[in-house]
């Protein structure tokens, strides 16, 4: 059963702007702006994915076909809006950082390519704002009964999984985590918490939270508490075995080349370990007072 006014949230101004800004950004880059490397490929993939799913959501809302799908539509749209916000925010930072310049590139690209890249950067920022507005509109207010993924706890689950993906990206980029059993334990913590978080999101989106044999909200609280303890151990162990003089290097080695330095990857892992720890602590605090309906 759809809550009243849900069509407005997905067919109103945010959805129209998402499609318009997404198509414009993608077209500007593909036509003349250009992209190269992993960063450019990620940006194009993020914009293309968000545009495709947004178009699917709008089509389903118009035709009411979402009632035929075996999933919780409210949870799906809330989760996607949060994921799209994170993807577009990352792309809105990466593309200008790696491709937009004030100076004109050499011919045959010329100043036209620069102008297209600057315009694409502007629309990428607007696209991020459009998705952020939808998250703000659909987020559950205090005391409101809604779908789980629209609560602060549900939205934090998407952010936690996204941050974990950043950690995994740094781990595989020559972080040398296999040197010690302690750092391998940290990788196990990241993997276990990520899989559990994805499972919570999947159960919510599929609408299967009511058939677990125990209250889903209590299960989420227990899991989040365990995740806080696990991440707390990783937040202590990882910096010690990477930056303590006995095991690693406290300062960046001067001979480390940019883009292929294990110390940089280890620092990224350490920073985002603390970010995710704070996210899980905040999640634990909000999980104590959530009110949601599994079927929404």
Image: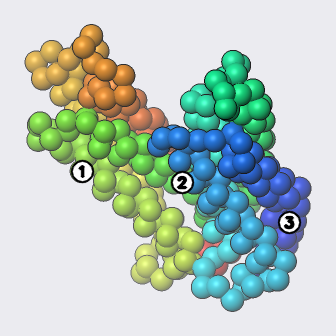
| Number of marks in picture | 3
Q: Mark 1 or mark 2, which has the lower sequence index?
A: 2
Cα distance between the residues tagged 1 and 2: 20 Å
Q: Residue 108: give x, y in percent of width and height.
A: 67, 32
Q: Is residue 189 left or right of residue 277?
A: left
Q: On the image, numbered disc 3 is attached to which residue?
A: 11
Residue at image coords 51%, 54%: 157
- Camera-near label (3 vs 1) is 3
Q: Is residue 211 visible?
A: yes
Q: What label does residue 188 carry, if any?
A: 1
Element class at badge 3: helix
Q: Residue 216: give x, y in percent of width and height.
A: 49, 70
Q: Residue 294: give x, y in percent of width and height.
A: 60, 74
CB atoms of marks 1 and 2 within 8 Å: no
Q: What label does residue 80 carry, if any?
A: none
- Camera-near label (2 vs 3) is 3
Please tell me how crowded label 1 is: few (under 14), some (14-19), or many (20+) other residues with Cα within 10 Å: some
Q: Quadrant of residue 106?
A: top right
Q: Is residue 261 left or right of residue 88?
A: left
Cα distance between the residues tagged 2 and 3: 23 Å
Cα distance between the residues tagged 3 and 1: 42 Å
Q: What label does residue 158 carry, if any?
A: 2
Element class at badge 2: helix
Q: Mark 2 or mark 3, which has the lower sequence index?
A: 3
* Furthest-bottom residue in this view: 68
Residue in the foreground of this view, choosing between 13 and 146: 13
Q: Quadrant of the N terminus?
A: bottom right
Please tell me how crowded label 2 is: few (under 14), some (14-19), or many (20+) other residues with Cα within 10 Å: many
């Amino acid at each position: 059963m759809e809550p009243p006014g849900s069509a407005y949230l997905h067919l109103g101004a945010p959805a129209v702007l998402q499609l318009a800004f997404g198509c414009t950004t993608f077209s500007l880059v593909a036509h003349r702006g250009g992209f190269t490397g992993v960063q450019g490929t990620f940006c194009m993939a993020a914009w293309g994915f968000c545009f495709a799913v947004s178009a699917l959501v709008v089509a389903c809302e118009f035709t009411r076909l979402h009632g035929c799908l075996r999933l919780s539509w409210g949870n799906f749209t809330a989760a996607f809006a949060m994921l799209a916000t994170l993807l577009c925010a990352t792309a809105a930072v990466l593309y200008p950082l790696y491709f937009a310049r004030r100076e004109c590139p050499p011919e045959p690209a010329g100043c036209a390519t620069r102008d297209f890249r600057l315009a694409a950067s502007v629309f990428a920022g607007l696209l991020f704002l459009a998705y952020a507005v939808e998250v703000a509109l659909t987020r559950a207010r205090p005391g409101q009964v809604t779908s789980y993924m629209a609560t602060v706890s549900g939205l934090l689950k998407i952010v936690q999984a996204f941050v974990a993906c950043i950690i995994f990206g740094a781990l595989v980029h020559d972080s040398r985590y296999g040197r010690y059993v302690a750092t391998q334990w940290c990788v196990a913590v990241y993997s276990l918490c990520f899989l559990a978080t994805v499972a919570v999101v999947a159960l919510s989106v599929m609408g299967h939270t009511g058939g677990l044999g125990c209250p889903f909200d209590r299960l989420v609280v227990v899991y989040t508490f365990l995740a806080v303890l696990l991440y707390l151990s990783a937040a202590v162990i990882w910096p010690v075995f990477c930056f303590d003089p006995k095991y690693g290097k406290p300062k960046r080695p001067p001979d480390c080349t940019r883009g292929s330095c294990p110390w940089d990857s280890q620092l990224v892992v350490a920073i985002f370990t603390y970010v995710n720890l704070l996210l899980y602590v905040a999640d634990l605090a909000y999980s104590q007072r959530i009110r949601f309906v599994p079927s929404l």
